[in-house]
Amino acid sequence: MIATSIKWTRHNLFGKPLDVVLSLLVIPGVLWLAYTITDWAFASAKWDIVVQSLRVLMIGVFPADQAWRAWTASAIIGAILGAGLGCVFCFKPHHGLVLLLVPVLLLIVDGGLENALPATGIIASTILGWALTSYVPLTRKVLPAAAFTGFIVIVAVMAPPGVGLWGGLLLSVLLTLVTSVLSLPIGILLAFGRQSRLSSLRIICTWYIEVMRSVPLILVVYWIWILMPVLEPQWGLADVARGMIGFTIFYSAYVAEYVRSGLQAVPRAQTEAARSLGMSEFDINRSIVLPQALRVVVAPLVGNVLDIFNSAPLVFIIGLTDFLRAGQMILANPQYGDRTFEVLSFLLVTYFVIGSMITYAARKLEDHMATGTR
Amino acid sequence: MTIHETSAVRGMVDHDHLKSRRLRNRIRHEAIQFGVIAIVVALLGMLAYAVKSGLAEKGIRFSFSFLANTAGFDISEGWTLTSGESFLPDFTLFSPDMTVASAFVTGIFNTAKIAILAIILSTVLGTMLGVGRLSTNWVVRNLCFWIVEFVRNTPLLIQLVFWYFAVVLRFPPMASAAHLYGLIVSQQGVYVPALSWVGGVSILSIALATLILVSAVGAIFDPIKGMRRVCVPAAVICFALLFVRGGVELNFPVANKFKASGGTSISPEMAALLLAIVVNSASFIAETVRGAIDALPKSQWEAAASLGLSRRYTVNDIVLPQVFRVVLPSFGNQYISLTKNTALGIAVGYPDLFNIYGTIANQTGHSLEGIIIVMASYLILSWIISTLVYWANRRLNPTGVPR
């Protein structure tokens, strides 16, 4: 045992002169950093601020007595995401146990039921959705319809206190979901438009995609935000809706580029074979080219969802209270002025956990899609 | 060609029939073409009309004349171009009595400044991280992996806020700032030594400066490799001569009570933005580099090993030169998205193009005209970058050379 570990150390840490130097430089540094962070996290950091303001971080300035609406919406989102997950990964009991750790941890840290109860509900509905699509394949067929109904229910449940009050992590997730769903069909149309035989359509789509890809997202969101009231003053669209439109307009161009790369990956012979069977151009694109193209780009599109989620904090520019703004709001309280590290590291770690899960899902999907093709 | 055309009766093709069908198809094609253009023009026209009437209701007139007005607000840092007395425009610090157009130029200057610095630094750091992920050293390999994973999976904006509020603003104040060979790191900003021109207008100094410029340009652009090799030492020698003759001198910053004088200062906002963007882009670049190294045929490593090359020589002379040929286009995309990310400077108050546009829109009310200018500026910046990368790519991959 000791001999193996010495061999491993010699092989992996002190193999060559350069490795020895690197190890001697890096290992003490890493150990010191790890010690500092652990010492700070467990000894000197005051995490009570995060626990106390967890509701604000999660749902923003949504009124406290109406919080059940936000929790219901979160549970529905959890169920939809879980059900989507179940179509690809089969649910195993240990997954459920790991997920249930979250409310248990909250209960231990917080000591009250105020936060633990909603968390239990959200996690339970996620597990339910996941298990349902894993074990009852028939439910996968009705998932799109169910998800659509779910979205309408979410809006209906969340709307009464005022759309302007949406916020926190819930807003970031909602924005990501709506943008990813809406930008897909527009992106597909743009991708086909860019490959069209009509030169006018091709030029217009190319211009749209190129312009959107070379200006910053923050500019597009801000622009849509100020342009909407000028165009249609009588609509009185809420800031949230204008933000979602801006995100969709911007990310459609990115989706279009991903889809186009997928369209180019479909062998020409497929189109020619379909044409020789006498199918119309529309039928060829819809039932031969697109399914094969989408199969290739599913993993990059999931990566794109991560991009959208990571740029969600940009909505601060139009005055929405997303996850980051909620954190900054808490820090603006002079009482908590010295807790910058605690709040910011909580934000970063939460984002990292969710982002890593999306990345992991994208990688798994890539493997899943790669097996059994052609 | 459709089924009907290929299966003409007994191989006989009715030419007149075919001709008329082709004509019909062409007319239909043109008609659709025309229809698409008409629809788009109509949509744009409706949009323009709606915007114009919407603005008219609020009493705002769509015009670019506000660009010539006096700005009336100050910008914390940045240079601009103004029409000086001479034929050439003056390059001076921005002041509130200049025009709005000058303010836009200051914004473009600040955006370009941070973009250029970040492109250089993130390429170096990213390559190091990417190579580090393939190190034989277990600790280095895993450290690089986790840095890249963490940065890639968290939003840039939160990273920026973290760098600004939790790192840069926690630097020691000027009185107890760290000094390191002329480098001063403090809350009030980071100060680095700068080269300053003290040669006046003496002929020798100007001649040496011109020579440095010419040889620097030659070192990059000269098509003959031998000439490029000669140009580099020439530039260095000229620079050393200039330095010895007293044409330029290193200007060290000196810390006073609240500020430092001399040297070049980097404001806290710029330092935070630069840190955030460099670390973020470096992680994406590292991922690209690692992917390209992984995609390199294994036989390259084996061939190098069978020639008895050490790992360092293998990486430096065999792997990286081939990798840089492949990754340049992805680097270009990363440079463009880096330039776009500088717009986040508004979150920490760095006066980049978007931030200054916000101020101008607030002050003058001409937000829509401003948007057009800002969009065009970003488009032009992106085009410049992609043209440069395309040119560099052509240079590295001459046509006809197999990969």
Image (cartoon, coloured by chain):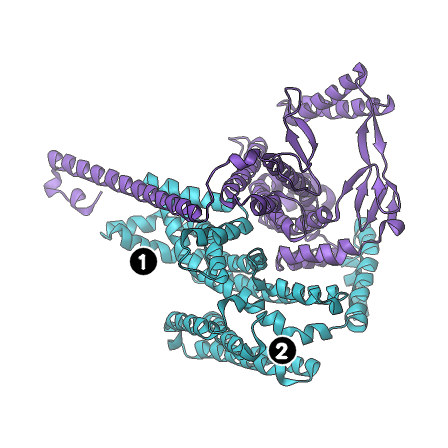
Chain colours: A cyan, B purple
Circle 1 Cα neighbour tier, 10 Å, few/some/many (<14 / 14–19 / ≥20): few
Quick one: SS at disc 2? helix
* Residue that extends furthest to the front in the rendered view of this protein: B59
In-front residue for pair A182/B329: A182
What residue is shown with label 2? A102
Q: Amino acid at mark 1?
A: Ser
Circle 2 Cα neighbour tier, 10 Å, few/some/many (<14 / 14–19 / ≥20): some
Residue A143 picture location, percent across and down: 40, 72
- Whether residue A245 is visible to the viewer of this picture, yes or no, is yes
B161 relative position to B262: left or right: left
The chain letter under disc 1 is A
Q: What distance separates the C-alpha of mark 2 from that of mark 1?
A: 43 Å
Quick one: SS at disc 1? helix
Residue B69 picture location, percent across and down: 58, 35
Q: Quadrant of residue B83?
A: top right
Residue B17 picture location, percent across and down: 12, 37
Q: Quadrant of residue B201?
A: top right
Q: Amino acid at mark 2?
A: Val
- Whether residue A374 is visible to the viewer of this picture, yes or no, is no
Residue under the point 66% across and 49% down:
B277
The chain letter under disc 2 is A
Residue under the point 46% across and 41% down:
B61
* B60 versus A112 height, above or below: above
Badge 2 and badge 1 in a common chain:
yes
Contact (Cβ within 8 Å) of mark 2 with mark 1: no
What residue is shown with label 1? A287
